[in-house]
Image (cartoon, coloured by chain):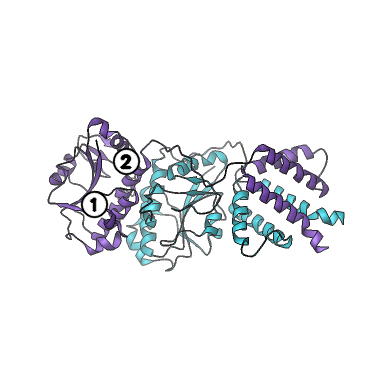
Chain colours: A purple, B cyan
Amino acid sequence: MTHQIVFILVRPQMGENIGAAARAMMNFGIGNLRLVAPRDGWPSEAAQTMSAGAFERMAVVQVYDTLKAALADCNMAYATTARPRDINKPVLSPRDAVNQTITAPSSGITRTAFVFGPERTGLENDEIACCHAIVTAPVSPDFPSLNLAQCAGLIAYEIASGGAELKTDKETATDPPAPLMDFENLFTRLERMLDEGAFFQSDDLRPVMVRNLRAMLLRGAWSTQEIRTFHGVMTALARLYENKN
Amino acid sequence: MTHQIVFILVRPQMGENIGAAARAMMNFGIGNLRLVAPRDGWPSEAAQTMSAGAFERMAVVQVYDTLKAALADCNMAYATTARPRDINKPVLSPRDAVNQTITAPSSGITRTAFVFGPERTGLENDEIACCHAIVTAPVSPDFPSLNLAQCAGLIAYEIASGGAELKTDKETATDPPAPLMDFENLFTRLERMLDEGAFFQSDDLRPVMVRNLRAMLLRGAWSTQEIRTFHGVMTALARLYENKN
């Protein structure tokens, strides 16, 4: 069974915000946008400009007269609002809503809607009543008014992030750390050079200084290539006075 | 010990984007913004208009000439970029970076920076090299270019979603990483010595070698004491042939 996620902007005022929302949606792979009674009409040049090309990658934007019409073929709907008002509905964080959404197909849900209200006023109570649950971002009580595209973007981001299921692929651009034998050889050479260069202030202090030095150099978990680089650094530094004198 | 999170916008082009970023930051309680060489100057009327009043709730916005100056008093820095390029640094999701950030005070970190590049071009490699790790949002490969304010907003959202308020932990097992200014001074001295010691094989290779070297040395997140130790190592190595000859 396929599961489609659609974003519905209800009575959006500015084309710019529609375009910015579309861009943020496509950044995170959400390609289905529905508009309910956009104030300045549709299509919109301002939306096009702000979208950075998102509409060319999206399914056709569908326009409806009412939220009920836009929700007709959806079997799960979340109302995004910063202010849960006097309405008896579950209130979820974006992450919890997305967790539900991800497991929705196992409940037979085929199309989930996230519903966003107009810029200034937000969703009306009747519109919130059309939805199964309320989604509220963890905004600061002192400054709660999220930009429309920001709100759409963070829901899309949560969907792309897989909700609470932390991605386990700890992908890093770094090479794996070198075998410890390589570190041992590096340390041995460095300590010999430091002995010659009178680095250790006394024989008593030497063991603890060696230990601290090894700890700090090991901490970077250098790769084999990086250890080679550090050998080169040591050689170059040692060459300094040779060149000079 | 208190832990402060700052957002740094590097060479932002449009005041509108600075304002939108500030609004999104304040929505999620992040009140410290630094600007590096904003193209259209500062203060900016366009920023004010787009901020929806965020600046009145923020600490004073600090303006710097260079990223290095803006990072000087930070002891942890994350570079946000969609495209991890040929740079040896850990690449984290926003969530993993924020998880690290939330536990940062237990490592003695007092000021963490999230660094955002200019709208079109993103951060330059030399700027990424100033940071400990890269943060990449899970964007769609087909449409990866996040709006600046969206990017700032989702990091701020993750911080707010991290649940617990920032921990203020007095006990630290290891010394905190040194401020980046100390690393900068170390790198500058080391590179001057390596130039004298004919370490760099050619002028063409020098920039990438410098970058890789900085990345591997920064990775250990050395303390102020450890940086002092490494200065001593450099001095001792450079003394080697002086003693011999």
> Is residue A80 visible to the viewer in this orientation of the structure?
no
Q: Quadrant of the C terminus of chain A?
A: bottom right
Is disc 1 surrounded by few (<14), some (14 to 19) or many (20+) residues within 10 Å?
few
Mark 2 or 1, closer to the camera: 1
| Mark 1 lies on residue | A59
Label 1: element kind: loop
Looking at the picture, how far across and down is residue B150, in whole percent? 36, 53
Amino acid type of the residue tagged 1 in the rendering = Ala
Which residue is nearer to you in this view: A194 or B98? Answer: A194
Q: Nearer the viewer, residue B131 or A105?
A: A105
Mark 2 surroundings within 10 Å by alpha-carbon count, few (fewer than 14), some (14 through 19), many (20 or more): many
Q: Residue furthest top?
A: A107
Q: Nearer the viewer, residue B243 or B38?
A: B243
In the rendered structure, the answer to whether residue B146 lies left or right of residue A62 reads right
Q: Output the chain of dot 1.
A: A
| Residue type pointed to by label 2 | Pro
Which residue lies under the disc numbered 2? A94
Marked residue nearer the N-terminal end (2 or 1):
1
